Amino acid sequence: MPRVDDATLFDRQLATLAAIDVMMAAAAPDSFQLDYEGVSMLIVPATPRRSVMNAVVYERPEALEAAYERIASDFHDAGIEAWTVWVPRADERSAEMLAAAGHVLDGSPVVMCAALEDLELDPALPGAISWTGGAPLQALVSIAGPAFEFDPGELARAFEVSPPGALTYIAEHDGRPAASVMAFDHDGDCGIYWVATAEEARGRGLCRGLMTAALLDARERGCTTTSLQATKAGYPVYAGLGFRDLGPIDMWELRA
């Protein structure tokens, strides 16, 4: 089978990033997702100051430009104080437009993707840790909340409901939840999100084991690719599993 090229992988992760908005919108009663032509936006009033939750994904610069005023109005009307637009580094046009509108570059995680058949996944790794799959979405709150510096209770309110499609994996250390991974499938791509480890349990291979379990399961479900956005802390784990570095994707934030 031909190697999946980087451009296809990058486009797949953008499509998955947009698709997960629908699932995330179902995780809390007051959250919602909106579509404008070529643009998807997620609004999470439970986390009004966290732009990683209130975010926009678009297909083309022209679509973002056409919808921008409505997008800004929707976030304002919902009481959102900080929101972001995911902008591929190559799209200088959108970056310039957003900067002119008052957005600032808030972060640049690395897009990492792979064809699942290319990954050499060691099935012994999940067996070396205590873990469970099929956990409710709320199970990751106590781990991912502190790891991503959410205010106490914010993430719990955003994840009040465990919607279909949220595949949550939890690992334990000393009998307590200590690491999390969430997987979400879209059109053959398994997106990976909310990868976190409690500070006292780091360096024990928990995330690597959970990631391996999630990716093996994705193969069984028929997914052919996998994608994520990597922080500096997570990058070595994903690179070690065989993910390819496809370059940064910029987060252009507008904060009231």
Image (spheres, rainbow, N blue to C red):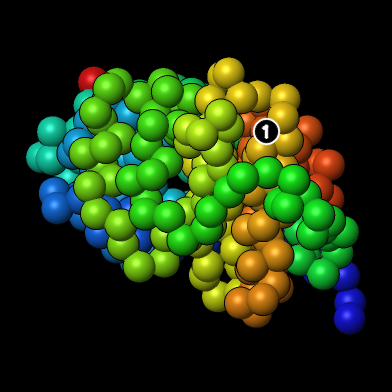
Secondary structure category for the residue under label 1 = loop
Quarter holding residue 19? bottom left
- The residue carrying pointer 1 sits among few (fewer than 14), some (14 to 19) or many (20 or more) residues within 10 Å by Cα, namely some
Instruction: Name the residue: 73% across, 35% down.
Output: 205
Evaluate whether residue 89 shows in this view.
no
Relative placement, left or right, of 219 versus 20 is right
Q: Residue furthest left?
A: 77
**Circle 1: residue type:** Gly
Name the residue rendered at 74%, 46% in the picture: 128
Residue 247 % position (x, y): 73, 41
In this rendering, position of residue 12 left or right of residue 244? left
What residue sits 38% from the left and 44% below the top?
139
Q: Is residue 41 left or right of residue 95?
A: left
Pinpoint residue 142: horizontal percent, then vertical percent.
38, 32
Q: Nearer the viewer, residue 63 or 205?
A: 205
Q: In which quarter of the image is the N terminus?
A: bottom right
